[in-house]
Structure formats: C-alpha cells, structure tokens
Image (cartoon, rainbow, N blue to C red):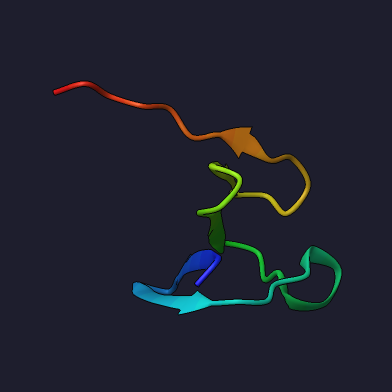
C-alpha cells in the first residue's frame, strides 16, 4: 500500500489517493513510498527519520 490515511480517529491504507478528489479537512495523509505527508491537502512535508 502506498498511502496511510488518518481521519476522525481511524486509520487505513490505500493504493490510490488524489488531493483534489479525496482530501477532507482534518485528514492527515502519509505517502509511504515518497516519505512525505500532508495535513492541509496543499503542502507535502518530508517525514523525518529518528535514530532511537
């Protein structure tokens, strides 16, 4: 699966996501292949790596 989506306290994986067609305010979308996420549907941020 390419995307992990968090919304209203639920999480699910999907292979397909389009900001224009699927984004709902309050949603956080993680692109697990590109290592980025968006929490506003406009700007994708790089996911940091922690070395615990």
Residue name at image x 48 percent, y 34 percent: 47
Residue name at image x 46 percent, y 76 percent: 13
Q: Residue furthest right?
A: 20
Q: Quadrant of residue 14?
A: bottom right
Query: How many circles with numbers are drawn on the protein?
Result: 0
Residue name at image x 68 percent, y 76 percent: 16
Towards the viewer: 31 or 5: 31
Relative to 20, residue 21 above or below: below
Tell me where residue 26 appears, x and y as whole percent. Answer: 56, 61
Q: Quadrant of residue 6?
A: bottom left
Q: Residue furthest left?
A: 52
Tell me where residue 46 appears, x and y as whole percent. Answer: 57, 32
Towards the viewer: 4 or 9: 4
Tell me where residue 30 appears, x and y as whole percent. Answer: 52, 55
Residue name at image x 55 percent, y 66 percent: 2
Relative to 36, residue 20 above or below: below
Relative to 5, residue 16 above or below: below
Relative side of 35 to 6, left or right: right
Q: Quadrant of residue 41?
A: bottom right
Q: Residue furthest top?
A: 51
Tell me where residue 10 appears, x and y as whole percent. Answer: 36, 77
Towards the viewer: 16 or 6: 16
Which image quadrant: the C terminus? Answer: top left
Relative side of 13 to 52, left or right: right
């Amino acid at each position: 699966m390419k995307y992990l989506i968090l919304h209203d306290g639920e999480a699910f994986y999907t292979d397909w996501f389009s900001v224009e067609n699927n984004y709902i305010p309050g949603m956080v979308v993680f692109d697990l292949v590109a290592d980025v996420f968006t929490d506003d549907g406009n700007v994708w941020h790089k996911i940091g790596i922690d070395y615990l």
